[in-house]
Image: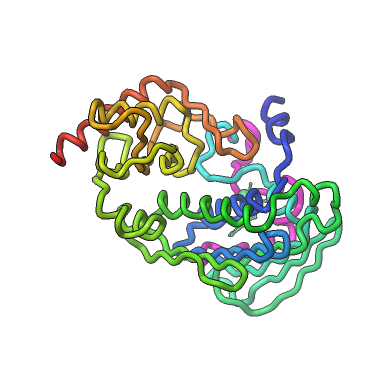
Amino acid sequence: PQVARLIAAGEVVSRPLDVVRELLDNALDAGATRIALEVAGGGLDLIRVRDNGCGIPAASAALAAERHATSKLSPDGAGAALHVTTLGFRGEALWAAAQAGELHLLTRPAAQVGACEVRAHGEATQVARVSAPAGTTVTVTRLFAELPARLRTQLAPAAEVREITALLGRYVLHHPGLSWRMVVDGEPRLTHAPADPRGAVASVYGPLSANRVMAVEAPGISGVVSRPELTRTRRDRMHFSVNGRPVQAPPELEKAVIEGFAELLGAGAAPLCVLNLTVAPEDHDPNIHPAKQVVALADLPAVAARVRAAVSAALAAHPL
Ligand code: ADP
Ligand code: MG
């Protein structure tokens, strides 16, 4: 029942940013190594994510946009949602996108000869066999076009695009080994070829920032942190992921990074950091928030202590 409540909780899609996050998560879950995001009109006109992942077999393509359709839970269903390792598992994202807008899906597993094209909106679903490259392209158009009340609460397109760009940046930073591309209103905004974490910092924040980061490596922690001279007063460049999912950093983790610098940081300063944390699935509950950006870590103080130690060790290993 708790899982049922969590599954029902919240609105899956309340703004373009939510759709983008769900589609990117699906591409990652599909094992894609190339992911391209296209946005027009702040995401209200069009959101498209194209990937070279596993595709959806013809037999299940028509069902992908059904509510609670997911290929990511074992038959014991709900119980498994507490230990999922995929980013998605509720089976609601495509369904929600097809309700809030018009969903177009083009998908083909590499081993299947033809591709499936699915159009879904509201109750209606149409399926056709077409030809297409292996992988999946999901397009959502006219988001909230029929929901004026929802439309009124949206940010201006430029503001939404800023947040979508920041979100994509976080995915790039946490998955630097993949190819990423973002196009906004027909203009290329970001291109990233597979690289190490420093390369991802270069793609997202520029080469100057990339030259000033050092590696952080410790059991269960990997990533980069900037040298003390490259610090800001805002914490908007502190990024964390837990088991591959970018998360909103608990303040305790931000504090741990800053404390790792000890007296090297000026008062109120925050470094740039990208830290990927690995914890045992049972120590981590991704269900807390419907948007899945907030994590609950079973033993936050212990994780924070590990982060603090890893950052001090990185500083000690790279004397200024
Ligand atoms: P969830 O991710 O929670 O399973 P979604 O509504 O996001 O639910 O997607 C429904 C199903 O459609 C997924 O379980 C998956 O089988 C399939 N799917 C969606 N997007 C992709 C994709 N990009 N590549 C392969 N399969 C996908
Ligand atoms: Mg999903």
Residue displayed at 34% across by 58% down: 202
Q: Which residues are magenta?
A: 51-80
Can residue 270 be spotted in the picture? yes
Q: Quadrant of residue 82?
A: top right
Quadrant in the picture for the C terminus: top left
Q: In the shown orientation, is residue 106 left or right of residue 294?
A: right
Position in image of residue 138 (x %, y %): 65, 64
Position in image of residue 43 (x %, y %): 67, 59
Q: In the shown orientation, is residue 122 left or right of residue 162?
A: right
Position in image of residue 185 (x %, y %): 62, 69
Does the magenta run of residues contain 142? no
Which secondary structure class fits the magenta region best? loop
Can residue 136 be spotted in the picture? no
Residue displayed at 41% across by 56% down: 204
| In front of the other: 58 or 220 | 220
Position in image of residue 244 (x %, y %): 44, 44
| In front of the other: 72 or 259 | 259
Above or below, comparing residue 58 to residue 307 in the picture:
below
Quadrant in the picture for the N terminus: top right
Q: In the shown orientation, is residue 175 left or right of residue 8?
A: left
Residue displayed at 35% across by 42% down: 273
Above or below, comparing residue 200 to residue 291 in the picture:
below
